[in-house]
């Protein structure tokens, strides 16, 4: 079932409320315009090219999400994500990907096109 943009945004707001109860906002914004909440340690499912990949949430804000995973995604790649077990897939566009010892740290923006 295709979700409407409004439904997707409501789902994201629920995730943010959950993160707010578990952590304080990151007061260092750096280049960011919106506060993010970390840690947001939700286990995530990513869907790309017909495959489902496991990931681990790091932080979340109104505009996007940070996570770690074993798969590299180039900047600009559009994939879908959801907390493990959720029914709703949210499209995201990769903004940056940094190799780490255990995989990749990825930052992505929510896509509502």
Image (cartoon, rainbow, N blue to C red):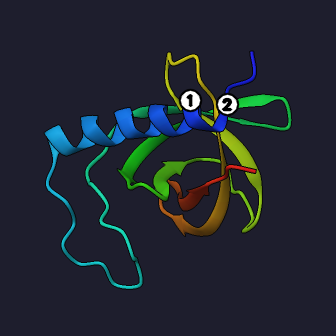
Q: Residue furthest front?
A: 6
The number of numbered discs placed on residues in the rendered structure image is 2
Position of residue 56 in the picture relative to residue 46 (left or right): left
Q: Position of residue 78 (x, y in %)?
A: 76, 52
**Percent coordinates x, y for residue 83 in the rendering:** 48, 29
Question: Up-down: is 101 above or below 85?
Answer: below
Separation of disc 1 and disc 2 at Cα? 5 Å
Q: Secondary structure at mark 1?
A: helix
70 vs 89: above or below: below
The percent coordinates of residue 17 (x first, y second) are 27, 38
- Residue drawn at point x = 16 percent, y = 40 percent: 22
Residue 4 got which mark? 2
Q: Position of residue 54 (x, y in %)?
A: 57, 33
Q: Quadrant of residue 93?
A: bottom right
Q: Say left or right for 113 vs 55.
A: right
Q: Residues within 10 Å of mark 1 (few under 14, many from 20)?
A: few
Question: Would you place residue 71 above or below residue 83 in this image?
Answer: below
Which residue is most to the right? 49
Q: Quadrant of residue 104?
A: bottom right
At mark 2, the secondary structure is: loop
Q: Quadrant of the N terminus?
A: top right
Give the residue at x 49% y 51%.
68
Q: Quadrant of residue 95?
A: bottom right
Residue at screen point 20% across, 45% down: 20
| Observer able to see residue 54 | no
For residue 64, which numbered disc appears in the image?
A: none
Label disc, if present, on residue 7 of the rendered structure: 1
Q: Is residue 85 above or below residue 8?
A: above
Question: For the residue carrying disc 2, how many other residues have a C-alpha within 10 Å: few (<14), some (14-19), or many (20+)?
Answer: few
The residue drawn where x is 50% and y is 56% is 64
Q: Are marks 1 and 2 in contact (CB under 8 Å)?
A: yes
């Amino acid at each position: 079932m295709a979700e409407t943009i409004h439904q997707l945004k409501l789902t994201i707001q629920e995730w943010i409320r959950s993160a707010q109860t578990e952590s304080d906002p990151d007061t260092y914004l750096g280049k960011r315009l919106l506060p993010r909440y970390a840690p947001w340690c939700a286990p995530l499912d990513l869907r790309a090219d017909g495959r489902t990949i496991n990931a681990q949430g790091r932080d979340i804000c109104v505009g996007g999400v940070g996570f770690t995973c074993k798969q590299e995604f180039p900047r600009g790649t559009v994939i879908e994500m959801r907390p493990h077990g959720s029914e709703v897939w949210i499209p995201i566009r990769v903004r940056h990907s940094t190799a780490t010892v255990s995989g990749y740290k990825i930052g992505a923006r929510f896509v509502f096109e």
